[in-house]
């Protein structure tokens, strides 16, 4: 049988490459998301710490300038926490986009693989049909060869077994 070579092989290789790149992108974006979640959690802890310290200072009684510094620290920590939350949300969107891209690329790869499988199946069936046709031709040739050799043998036997009168006539003619 001839070695199968699909016309979609190059496309399939490119789709595999795209799939690997998309997988890498998903992994990278997931790592970014994990870092953003950790940073957000740290920011949340710092905010709670500053809020608790501010609450403790307020219970002791503070002056105006100290109170404004305390409130500025709380506002700054809240702002940093909001930034961390935004970064996490952006990272989540990037992961979703990367996953969507990966799923699209994966679907394209599966489609090309199905085309290659169909093409391979057709090739195999064509090769089997060709092999069957060759086998039938060989069988027919063998049958004709046997028939012609059997006919030749019958003719020679028939000539040898002519009745005696025919033999006599044959000898006279010579």
Image (cartoon, grey):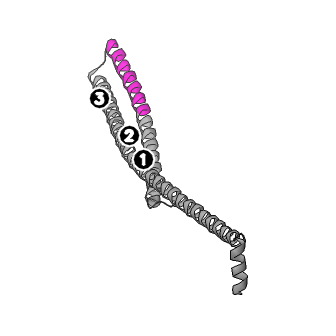
**Numbered circle sitting on residue 75:** 3
Q: Which SS class for mark 3?
A: helix
Q: Residue furthest top?
A: 59
Of residues 139 and 159, the one nearer the viewer is 159
Tell me the mark number nearer the camera, choosing from 2 and 1: 1
Q: Position of residue 142 (x, y in %)?
A: 62, 64
- Left or right of 81, for residue 151: right
**Residue at figure coordinates x 36%, y 15% from the top left:** 56
Question: CB atoms at circles 3 and 1 under 8 Å apart?
Answer: no
Of residues 160 and 11, the one nearer the viewer is 160
**Numbered circle sitting on residue 95:** 2
169 within the magenta span: no
Q: Position of residue 164 (x, y in %)?
A: 72, 72
**Numbered circle sitting on residue 167:** none
Q: Position of residue 40 (x, y in %)?
A: 39, 31
Q: Residues within 10 Å of mark 3 (few under 14, many from 20)?
A: some
**Residue at figure coordinates x 46%, y 39% from the top left:** 31
Q: Residue furthest front?
A: 165
**Numbered circle sitting on residue 110:** 1
Query: What is the span of residues highlighted in magenta in the rendered image?
Result: 37-61
* Earlier residue among tags 3 and 2: 3
The residues bearing labels 3 and 1 have C-alpha atoms spaced at a distance of 52 Å
Q: Is residue 1 visible?
A: no
Question: CB atoms at circles 3 and 2 under 8 Å apart?
Answer: no
**Residue at figure coordinates x 44%, y 49% from the top left:** 19
60 within the magenta span: yes
Counting labels gives 3
């Amino acid at each position: 049988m001839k070695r199968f070579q699909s016309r979609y092989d190059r496309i399939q290789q490119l789709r595999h490459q795209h799939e690997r790149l998309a997988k890498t992108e998903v992994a990278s974006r997931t790592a970014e998301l994990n870092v953003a979640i950790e940073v957000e959690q740290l920011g949340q802890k710092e905010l709670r710490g500053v809020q608790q310290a501010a609450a403790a200072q307020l219970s002791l009684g503070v002056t105006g300038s100290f109170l404004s510094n305390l409130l500025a620290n709380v506002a700054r920590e809240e702002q940093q926490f909001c930034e961390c939350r935004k970064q996490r949300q952006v990272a989540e969107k990037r992961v979703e986009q990367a996953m969507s891209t990966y799923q699209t690329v994966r679907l394209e790869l599966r489609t090309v693989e199905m085309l290659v499988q169909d093409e391979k199946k057709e090739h195999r069936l064509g090769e089997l049909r060709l092999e069957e046709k060759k086998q039938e031709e060989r069988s027919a040739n063998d049958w004709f060869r046997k028939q012609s050799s059997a006919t030749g043998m019958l003719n020679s036997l028939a000539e040898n077994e002519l009745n005696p009168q025919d033999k006599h006539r044959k000898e006279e003619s010579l």
